[in-house]
Amino acid sequence: MTPTQPFWKIKTLAQMSPQEWESLCDGCARCCLYKLQDEETGEIYYTDVVCRLLDTQRCRCTAYHERTVLMPTCLVLNPDLVQQLKWVPKTCAYRLLAEGKDLEWWHPLVSGDPSTVHEAGISVRWKTQAENEVDMDNLEDYIVDWLG
């Protein structure tokens, strides 16, 4: 008897069930960081400023199902958007799979432990500032380079 392959190795992003799709989120919360884009070069810069809806200890949205209403700039990722958006972090499972790569060892689906994303230093836990604590008119002052 051969072992069964994990769903992310045998299905495309578009073929995944809603439950499978949601389980791909590793809980890093990098997508919740405010980002800036250089208008001339198109380069994306991440800041250490996070959305007000983010629980920074758990790295989870406190209003996940209402997030797009409460935060109109929040996007609901889908297979097409993952391939179009340049700001999706390089470590993001959605991006990795869209690029034909495998999940990292620290991903909860691989490790079996949701804390490995934090232990590996991938998540934004303990590295951010809340949007209500910074001068949002000067986001460029909060650009960081720890995302690798």
Image: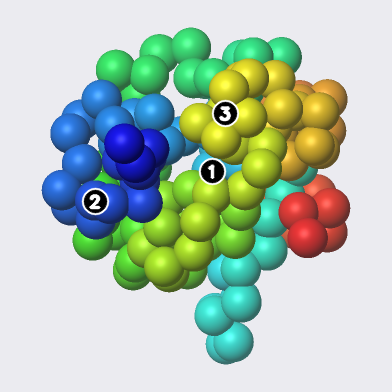
130 over 35 or under it: above or below: above
The amino acid marked with disc number 3 is: Pro
Decide which of tag 2 and tag 1 comes sooner along the chain.
Answer: 2
Callouts 2 and 1 close, C-beta under 8 Å: no
The amino acid marked with disc number 2 is: Lys
137 over 1 or under it: above or below: below
| Count of numbered badges drawn on the protein | 3
| Residue in the picture at 54% in, 43% down | 31
Secondary structure state at the residue bearing disc 1? helix
| Residue in the picture at 57% in, 87% down | 40
Q: Which residue is mark 1?
A: 31
Camera-nearest residue between 35 and 23: 23
Q: Which residue is mark 2?
A: 11
The amino acid marked with disc number 1 is: Cys
- Locate residue 120, reporting x and y percent: 80, 37
Query: Closer to the observer: label 3 or label 1?
Result: 3
Residue 137 visible to the viewer: no
Callouts 3 and 2 close, C-beta under 8 Å: no
Secondary structure state at the residue bearing disc 2? loop
Q: Which residue is mark 3?
A: 108
- Locate residue 45, reporting x and y percent: 68, 63
The 10 Å Cα crowd at callout 2, few under 14, some 14 to 19, many 20 or more, is some
| Residue in the picture at 57% in, 28% down | 108
Camera-nearest residue between 105 and 86: 105
What's the CA distance linking mark 3 and mark 1?
Answer: 17 Å
